[in-house]
Each structure stands twice: as structure tokens, then as C-alpha cells.
Image (spheres, rainbow, N blue to C red):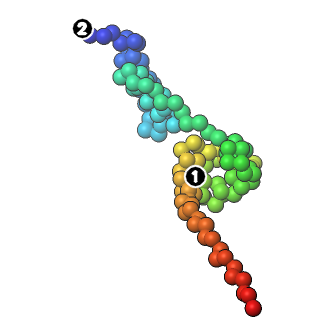
């Protein structure tokens, strides 16, 4: 017994979309066109379509880490925290941080705290004369 696909016209849609994208973009495909082809191919094979990454602003990251947004921007400018600049370059940068890059940043800053051993102070000796 064979199962019927959820979308019987997916093969035709895939062919049409591929042809349309190749005509419009040729070999220079935009990220949007590439993403569209990926979604159509995933639907054609009945696979789960992955969610796009969640992008966090510097104030969002600052609230999560309980630091100032300026500290987050400093980490981004120094290259310690990877971010995407969505700004057009004419005005101030509009940084966005993915959850994966935030996790990598935090993993790189992890330290191992060694337990301290409490030492008892030697009792004072009283001198009797």
C-alpha cells in the first residue's frame, strides 16, 4: 500500500519554481531564491521545513546576560560575539545575534571554578610567665 503525498502537485511546483528562478536569476541566485528552492525540495520529499534562526538585538542579549547593551556592542565590534549587521551602512549599525553564536560566545567564556579549601587558623598560644 503506497501513501499518497500531501501535495500531489509538488513535482510540478518544483519544476516550475526551478525554471522560474533559473530564468529570473540565472546562476546568480539570491538568498531568497535559494531558500525558496530549499523549501520546495523539502516539501517534495515530505521533510520538516527548518525554522529560520531567531535573531536577537543587543538589548535582548543584554537583558539575558544582565549586562548593558553597550557591553554587547563592544563584544560584537571586537569580534568576540558574532553578529549580523542588517543596517545599510549609511546610518548606525543594526546588529542581530543568532542564538547559536550567543551559545558559542558563552561556551568560550565558561570557566571552571575550583572549590576553595577553608583552612583553620592555628589556635593562638597563650604565653604564661
Disc 2 crowd rating (10 Å Cα; few below 14, some 14-19, many 20+) is few
Q: Residue furthest front?
A: 129
Taking depth in this image into account, of 13 and 55 the one nearest to the observer is 55
The answer to whether residue 92 is seen in the rendering is: yes
Q: Is residue 38 above or below residue 3?
A: below
Q: Nearer the viewer, residue 23 or 77?
A: 77
Q: Earlier in the sequence, mark 2 or mark 1?
A: 2
> Which of the 4 image quadrants contains residue 18?
top left
The disc placed on residue 1 is: 2
- x 64%, y 54%: residue: 76
Q: Is residue 40 left or right of residue 74?
A: left
Please tell me which residue is depicted at 67% across the width and 44% down the height of the picture: 64
**Residue 104: percent from left, percent from top:** 53, 51
Q: How many marks?
A: 2
Residue at image x 41%, y 18%?
13
- The residue identified by callout 1 is 106
C-alpha separation, residue under disc 2 versus residue under disc 1 = 50 Å
Crowd around label 1: few <14 · some 14–19 · many ≥20 (10 Å): few
At which x and y percent is residue 78?
64, 60
Amino acid at each position: 500500500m503506497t501513501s499518497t503525498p500531501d501535495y500531489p502537485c509538488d513535482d510540478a511546483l518544483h519544476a516550475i519554481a526551478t525554471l522560474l528562478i533559473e530564468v529570473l536569476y540565472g546562476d546568480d541566485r539570491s538568498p531568497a531564491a535559494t531558500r525558496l528552492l530549499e523549501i520546495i525540495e523539502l516539501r517534495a520529499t515530505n521533510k520538516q521545513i527548518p525554522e529560520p534562526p531567531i535573531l536577537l538585538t543587543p538589548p535582548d542579549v543584554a537583558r539575558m546576560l544582565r549586562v548593558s547593551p553597550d557591553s554587547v556592542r563592544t563584544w560584537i565590534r571586537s569580534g568576540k560575539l558574532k553578529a549580523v549587521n542588517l543596517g545599510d551602512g549609511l546610518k548606525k549599525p543594526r546588529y542581530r545575534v543568532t542564538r547559536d553564536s550567543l551559545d558559542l560566545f558563552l561556551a568560550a567564556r565558561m570557566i571552571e571554578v575550583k572549590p576553595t579549601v577553608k583552612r583553620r587558623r592555628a589556635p593562638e598560644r597563650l604565653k604564661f610567665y
